[in-house]
Image (cartoon, rainbow, N blue to C red):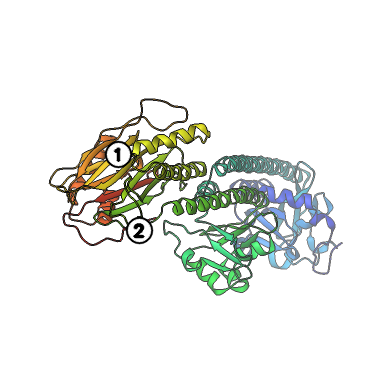
Amino acid sequence: MAGSDGEVSLPRLGDEGRLGALRETGLSAASDAGMERFARLAAEVVGVPVSLVSLVEPARQVFPGMVGLADPWAESRQTPLTHSLCQHVVAEGRPLVLTDAREDTRTCASLAIPDLGVVGYAGMPLTDSDGHVLGSLCAIDTEPRRWSERELGLLEDLAAACSAELRLRIVSRQRQDAMDMAETNARRYRGALDRSQLLLSAADALADTTGLAEVRQTVRDLVTSDLKPVYVGLVLVENDSAGRLRRLIDETGGAPMEREYETYDLDSGWPTARAARENRTITVTDEAELRQDYAPEAVEAFNSLGLSSAVCVPLPGTVIPLGTLVLGWDEAHEIDIVEQALLAALAGYTARAVERALFVDNRVSAARQMQEAMLTDLPEVEGVELAALYRPAAETDLVGGDWYDAYPLPSADQGGEDSPAPDVLAVSIGDITGHDLNAATLMGQVRSMLRQADLDHPGAGPARAVAGVEHVNTRLDIGASGTLVHAHLRPCPKPQEGSWELTWTNAGHPPPLIALAGTPGRRLHEHEMMIFPGLTGPERTDSRITLTPGSALLLYTDGLVERTGQTMTEAIDLTAQLLTDHTRQSLPELLDAIMDQVPASGTGDDIALLALRIPATQPPPIQAASTEQ
């Protein structure tokens, strides 16, 4: 059937298989060298002024091959179907041969007659391998024409050759599409494999994390190589309040907004808060969406990070989410279903690592408090200056067994609290093996046992107290091992008034350093075996030296002098030199100078220092320096 304007309205024109084949030819309203040759050949062999390779689309016909057509049709290389006789070839599925298109009821109303000058018309079907008619190879005369059998045969042969070319192009396009699909699938499979590897790496890497900062750094390292975000952050629900969130701060300073907006309410207008509150993944596709749905400060933070898109994934918890994992990109980033699954799994691993880190942090905090409680203030002693410093391990951020202590003892001949006999000052420093809560606990026991042994044996030397500790350690199976230096300091009688006698014993500890007035710092080499359960050896002995006014003594643990690339001997020599060079500075300043110059940066061991000095002139009693943490 044809309408009044000659346009055909039949299902065949809109057949999906035919339209798909048209697309796969890759041809449209543009010149194609191959199709142009077929149009020229048709015009020459049949002897017509106009020849077209016409492909019929749902609303137009296009001419990738064309000879003799006048403008404006020649320039646009297309016409609407109101100007198409070729549509009848497609609709009927067979050749259309007309001596005079003006006399055929199917075509007499077509605008191709007045506008294109079509009178004589012979159109042969162009088909694909499935039999779909894609268009026609047509010969057009501007006058009535009786087509000979020879002309129609030649035109049919050319149409068959043109159809073969179209089929080849369709097959080539299908082959290319198949190759592209294969490559797309290969990339998808490689991506899935990479993401599977990422999850395996995440499970392995996050299982070894012990602190929140390490958890964040590990997650950032994992996702940056695969998903390539420019920002990775963690926001956690605070333990002490169900209504607050706190960001984990990037200590490198790369995201200043983290400090500006470190804490905020769980019910606030942040996408991270919404993800935790609603326990679902929230995506931000652009700034406009952020301005519409969230608070102004969220927009400001988003812009300060230079983000164009972001995703906020809740960290699953037992009751409510632990917080939110945030990934941001500086360009549009669409999260597909595979990536959603990846991020959900990664958030699960991250949540477990966060829980573990919080547990460890709580244990460390409790142990730190216990350890700090044991590092009591130093006593005030007339005629002796005292200062101490304790610094925990930088790398592990765990407690350990290092300690120092100083306390007064009654002398053996003290007859009562009104007796003029001077007191003894006991000082000690030690290092119990280990860097964990057990080591800190054992340190507290050894420290207390040493005090008790001193009090139970008034007048006895330090060696007697250490031997008592070893006896209890073995008999009660306490299990403490390590090193220590324990010393007693008592004022000398006339004529050495102003000097103090130092008596000490060394149980396998680094040698104390002493700088006598007017002499360079040196080591007190005398030492014996370390403390170890069941280990027996020669009876412990005391050593003695007199500290004249101006003398200084430094006790330290091995974390001070164990340095990569430098021997312990060199580090001890440097410390002794500093002890000599800073005789005119206060003891806290001396300890600061030692800590600045001797230990390696990021040392993996605790450091404890205890210094005492006999003033050159006896001042009034001095308030001892408080412990530095």
The answer to whether 607 is drawn above or below residue 325 in the figure is above
Residue 216 visible in the displayed image: no
Q: Which mark is residue 626?
A: 2
Q: Could you tell me how far apart the alpha carbons at marks 1 and 2 are, in whole angstroms? A: 24 Å
Q: Is residue 159 left or right of 550 when viewed as pictured?
A: right
Q: Which mark is residue 504?
A: 1
- Residue 564 place in picture, x, y as percent: 32, 37
Depth check, front residue: 587 or 589: 587
Three-letter amino acid code at disc 2?
Answer: Ser
Question: In which image quadrant can residue 237 be found?
Answer: bottom right
- Residue 517 place in picture, x, y as percent: 15, 47
Question: In which image quadrant can residue 587 be found?
Answer: bottom left
Quarter of the image that includes the N terminus = bottom right
Depth check, front residue: 179 or 22: 179
The secondary element bearing badge 1 is classed as strand
- Residue 5 place in picture, x, y as percent: 79, 68
Q: Is residue 137 left or right of 201 when viewed as pictured?
A: right
- Please tell me which residue is depicted at 71% across the width and 56% down the height of the picture: 140
Three-letter amino acid code at disc 1?
Answer: Trp
The secondary element bearing badge 2 is classed as loop
